[in-house]
Image (cartoon, rainbow, N blue to C red):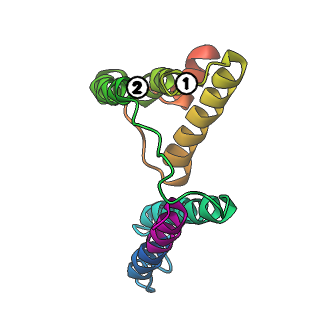
Amino acid sequence: MTPRVINLIAGGAILGLSALFYAQTLGDRFADTPLSRNPMAFPRLLVLLMALGGAVVIAQALLTRRGALPGEAVPALNWPRAALITALAAAYFWVFEPFGFLIATGLFLPLAVVALGYRRLLVIVPVTLVVLVGLWYLFAQVFQIRPPGPGMDDLLRLMTGGR
């Protein structure tokens, strides 16, 4: 089988599993529950992201050249980069508890992006800030799950002199 066919099959399997998992979250037991307290909201979000990943795999397979050789080389895994990302993830979890979500994630995101090979600082900093604030807002305000450590509200209170 060609890599293109393998990707089509894998993407289809991911979409199928996503549909199966989503079906497990259906039902009207929590229909009257607000989104922030609905125990099915976060699993549905994760299933949606999983389905999106499957769709991306299928799209890549469909956009790949049809004439690709069956034995076309797959790039080798960059072991030093994989080890660095693994070490960064371990450090993230180590820093997460004592320093909190904002500090740990604010350090991890740009370091992980640089470790993956992206070097444009003028892109890394704003993307990190947007993702950091967006994730905090999603958990703290939408799902009402307060991430550990100081939050944005604490930061704003500190910046405005405690008001």
19 up-or-down from 95: above or below: below
Circle 1 Cα neighbour tier, 10 Å, few/some/many (<14 / 14–19 / ≥20):
few
Which numbered tag is attached to residue 117? Answer: 1
| In the displayed structure image, the side of residue 18 where residue 83 appears, left or right | left
Identify the residue at horizontal 31%, vertical 24% (top origin). 87
147 up-or-down from 120: above or below: below
- Quadrant in the rendering for residue 150: top left
- SS for dot 2: helix
Which numbered tag is attached to residue 14? Answer: none
Identify the residue at horizontal 53%, vertical 21% (top origin). 114
* Image x and y of residue 14, in percent: 45, 69
Outermost residue, bottom side = 28
Say what amino acid the circle numbered 1 marks: Gly
* Image x and y of residue 94, in percent: 27, 25
What are the residue bounds of the magenta stretch?
1-14
Magenta-colored segment: predominant secondary structure: helix
Q: Is residue 11 magenta?
A: yes
* Image x and y of residue 20, in percent: 41, 80
* Marks 1 and 2, the one that precedes in the sequence: 2
130 up-or-down from 120: above or below: below
- Quadrant in the rendering for residue 133: top right
Circles 1 and 2, Cβ within 8 Å, touching? The answer is yes
| In the displayed structure image, the side of residue 58 where residue 146 appears, left or right | left
| In the displayed structure image, the side of residue 162 where residue 74 appears, left or right | left
Marks 1/2: CA distance?
9 Å
Which numbered tag is attached to residue 81? Answer: 2
